[in-house]
Each structure stands twice: as C-alpha cells, then as structure tokens.
Amino acid sequence: MNLIELTDVTCGYREHVALEHIDLSFDDGCFIGVVGPSGSGKTTLLRLLAGTLDPVAGRVRRRPGLRVGYVPQVETINWTFPVTVAECVLMGRAAGRRLPWRSRAEQAEIDAVLERLGLAGLAHRHIRALSGGQQQRMFLARALLQRPDLLLMDEPTSGVDVRTRHEVLHLLGELNADGVAMVLTTHDLNGIAAHLPHLVCLNRRVLGAGPPTAVLTPDVLEATFGARLDVLEHAGMPIVFEHPHDNVIPLRRSAS
C-alpha cells in the first residue's frame, strides 16, 4: 500500500474550493516538489496529507500507523516566543510526552539530530538568535524527532540566500536517501524544483506530474501560472525564464 493515496479529492474552506478532483499517490521513499502560484492549493494539499484537513469529496487513504512530520513556513512563526532551540525541537514529541522536562534519552536524541543538521552547540540559544537557514533546520530537526515516515515542508527555502538554499536541498537529499519520504512546496522553479526527481504542477487541479524534464514545459507552466514561460535545457536540466514579451510573474534565478 502507498503511504497516502488521494482519489478524486475535492477540498475547500466554506464557499471557496481550494482543490478539486485530485488524484495523487505518495510512495515509500518519494521526493516530490509541488509548484504553483499563490492560492493554488499547495498548503491545502500539505494539510490534507498531514491529516489536519478533511476533504469535502473523494477519498484519502493512508497507511495504518503512518507517522507524518511537518515543517512550516518560517514566516508564520512568532520569533519572540520565549523558547530555546532544544525546547522547540522537543515540541516534536509533545503529543506522546508525560514529563515536563527532558529525559537523558530525549536530550541525547536532540543533541544527535542537532549535530546531524549542523546545529551542534546551539541547543540553549533563543530561536530568534538563529540565522534564516538555522531556523529552517531547527524546524526540520523538530519534525525529524517524530521519526516520520513522511516529511512535509511548506516552502523550506523561502527567504534564505542561494548558498543556504543549496545546503538545505543537499541535506534533504541525504535524509531522503536514508529512507524518509518527502513532499515540499516551492515557488523556486530553478533553484529547487528543477533539482527534484518528481514534480507536481498544481493550480486547484493537478496540471502535470512527473520528472522536471516532463513537467517544466511551456504548455504545463502556462496552464499552471497563467502566463507564458520559456524553458531551456542546460546540463540536462530545464531552466525556466520569463517570456520577454509578456508581463509575467517574477521567478527566482538559480546560481547553479
């Protein structure tokens, strides 16, 4: 059985339909990027996968006992909240904890995951004292402490510089190679999406799904973003850029 399977799923909020007639499956070890404009339903899809939102029609089937971790957008966090890095990471275990303090075993796990993510020595630092890349890795550590089978990430490289973006992508690739299935949303077609093994183009409906070379095409991108985008191939990878004669959405440029 797949980790999660969506069959003819429609979902919305009150009168607004966010997703309609979605058919998608997520397998063991998948590494999938979901791209689309703002308001296209990307975060709604993550909420469906996380089990925090129910469809209004269709069926969501999930593997029994499936553990799901979630990494939110850093822009949604209250960085003045009085919590340290270690305390924030331990929140990943909040649902199953009985003691208000960390056990030795939990501290050892926290130390191990922080070291794995390049945050060793920062456990007692306040979360607002971290750089943007460190903040993103802290929330990744919190999700990993749940030992997830599936990791969901909402714009994991939003607001970080090019170097940090590549470091995060490399780290996610390592975690995926260790067996963690991943689904992430991104606006970054060149810096992130073109480097992932599988993409889903989403704008209320699934408009394309497959490897970047099959999905990042002018026709699929125009249907997704509502504007003409051109695509060139460089070193076997598609490079997306704005059509010179159209007034279209800005895209981040890749330094690679």
Image (cartoon, grey):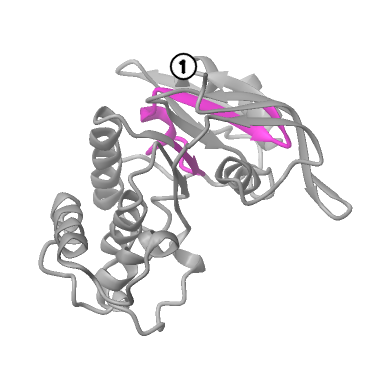
- Name the residue nearer the viewer: 102 or 184: 102
Which residue appears farthest toward the left when viewing the image?
121
Query: What type is the residue that disc 1 sits on?
Result: Thr
Q: Dividing the picture into quarters, in which one does residue 110 lie? A: bottom left
Where in the figure is residue 57, as x and y percent of width and height? 82, 35
Which residue appears farthest toward the front when viewing the image?
98
Question: How would you rate the neighbour count of disc 1 (Cα within 10 Å): few for under 14, some for 14-19, many for 20 or more?
Answer: some
**Magenta stretch in the rendered image:** 183-206
The local secondary structure at tag 1 comes to helix
Q: Dividing the picture into quarters, in which one does residue 255 lie? A: top left
Magenta segment includes 125: no
140 vs 131: above or below? above
- Name the residue nearer the viewer: 101 or 24: 101
Q: Name the residue tied to disc 1.
A: 213
Could you tell whether 125 is left or right of 29 in the image?
left
Name the residue located 46 percent from the left edge and 30 percent from the top edge: 32
Name the residue located 55 percent from the left edge and 47 percent from the top edge: 250
Where in the figure is residue 249, as x and y percent of width and height? 61, 45
Could you tell whether 70 is left or right of 82 in the image?
right
- Name the residue nearer the viewer: 247 or 145: 145
